[in-house]
Image: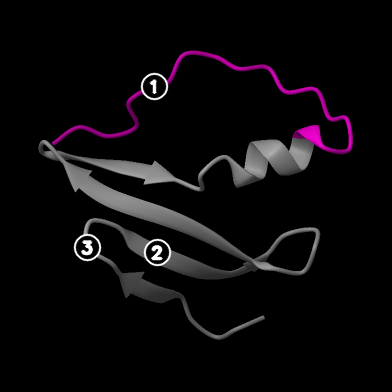
Amino acid sequence: MINKTISIKTKDWVEITTPYIDRHNDYIQIYIKKSKGSFILTDYGYTVDDLLLPGVRVRFTKEKKVAKN
């Protein structure tokens, strides 16, 4: 495991590489962007795709707001 979280800023997004690994021994990466006073956080569908590939059933629900100002 790496000792720290690494972030790289592009034009609109910040890529965050966490010290945690997935089942393929790759570091988990997430992306964050500020938009209209809130933040968008994504992994571009990697986690869900990685669960669906071996046949894990995933139940989707409406998105929920996690935090408010």
Q: Residue furthest front?
A: 11
Residue 40 tag number:
none
Few, some or many residues within 10 Å of mark 3 (<14, 14–19, 20+) = few
Relative placement, left or right, of 48 versus 29 is right
Q: Quadrant of residue 59?
A: top right
Nearer mark to the viewer, of 3 and 1? 3
Distance (Cα) linking label 1 and label 2? 22 Å
Do the residues under discs 3 and 1 have CB atoms within 8 angstroms?
no
Distance (Cα) linking label 3 and label 1? 27 Å
Residue at 28 percent across and 67 percent down: it is 10
From the image, tell me which residue sits under label 3.
Answer: 11
**What's the residue type where badge 3 is placed?**
Lys
**N-terminal label among 1 and 2:** 2
From the image, tell me which residue sits under label 1.
Answer: 64
Relative placement, left or right, of 62 versus 12 is right
Instruction: Provide residue 55's location: percent of width, then percent of height.
Output: 88, 30
Residue 15 tag number:
2
